[in-house]
Image: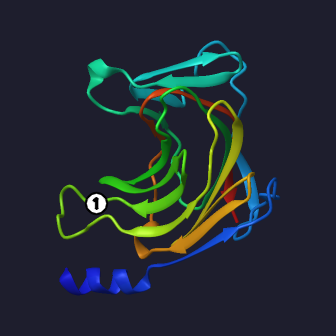
């Protein structure tokens, strides 16, 4: 196991690009295939594909509005129950109030895998530690500083192909990297947030070719 972890560390790579504001966020490493989900949240309730694990997740004015509940003593978590491996995910988001940001999180079959962390001060991509195997630590894949203003809508796109990931936003931020742990089947997509409130809209998921 120790030899395997050493190899993984050597294979981690990343890059950061700060492009012009309002840059195009068309896919860069994948070709969009079949549309798996196209959700504008026009109905009053979330569909069967969604499961609110923690916190409060409601549809309001055509968007998901989320907030952390102190009684949970846990971040708010919403799961999209769609199995995936290579895919492209794009959605709009808005931070409000005391929101500290959110994670767009991916799991593997036995636990947490990696996440794209959106904070008011920037964007981070990192793997998750393995709670069952303490030799597998969280590792930074890529990061970049930028400002996400409260009360303003942005669009985030995440491409996942094999061991590669690219995350970019429509305010000109782009981070990319590789890690061998990413090349695996994933049982769902998850949104994780702390604070009040996060809004999510115009979610679209493609299978990546």
Residue 87: image location, x then y, percent: 62, 57
Residue 162 seen by the camera = no
Q: How many marks?
A: 1
Give the left or right position of residue 83, taking residue 74 as reference: right
Give the left or right position of residue 92, taking residue 74 as reference: right
Query: Where 3 falls versus 115 (above or below)?
Result: below
Could you tell me which quadrant the N terminus lies in? bottom left
Residue 206: image location, x then y, percent: 69, 51
Query: Where 141 falls versus 76 (above or below)?
Result: below
Q: Quadrant of residue 63?
A: top right
Residue drawn where x is 45% and y is 65% of the image: 184
Residue 100 seen by the camera = yes
Residue drawn where x is 66% and y is 64% of the image: 174
Give the left or right position of residue 51, taking residue 203 as reference: left
Where does label 1 land, which residue? 129
Q: Secondary structure at mark 1?
A: loop
Residue 57: image location, x then y, percent: 50, 22
Query: Where 137 falls versus 101 (above or below)?
Result: below
Could you tell me which quadrant the C terminus lies in? bottom right
């Amino acid at each position: 196991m120790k030899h395997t972890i050493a190899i993984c560390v050597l294979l981690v790579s990343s890059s950061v690009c700060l492009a012009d504001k309002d840059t195009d966020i068309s896919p860069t490493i994948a070709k969009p295939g079949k549309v798996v989900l196209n959700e504008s949240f026009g109905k009053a309730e979330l569909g069967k594909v969604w499961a609110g694990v923690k916190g409060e997740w409601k549809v309001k004015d055509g968007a998901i509005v989320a907030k952390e509940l102190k009684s949970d003593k846990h971040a708010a978590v919403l799961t999209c129950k769609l199995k995936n491996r290579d895919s492209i995910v794009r959605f709009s988001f808005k931070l409000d109030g005391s929101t500290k940001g959110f994670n767009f999180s991916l799991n593997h079959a036995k636990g947490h895998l990696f996440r794209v962390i959106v904070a008011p001060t920037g964007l981070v991509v990192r793997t998750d530690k393995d709670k069952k195997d303490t030799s597998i630590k969280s590792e930074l894949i890529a990061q970049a500083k930028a400002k996400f203003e409260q009360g303003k809508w942005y669009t985030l796109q995440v491409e996942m192909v094999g061991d590669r990931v690219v995350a970019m936003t429509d305010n000109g931020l782009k981070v990319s990297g590789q890690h061998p742990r990413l090349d695996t089947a994933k049982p769902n997509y998850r949104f994780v947030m702390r604070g009040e409130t996060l809004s999510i809209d115009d979610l679209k998921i493609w299978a990546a070719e």
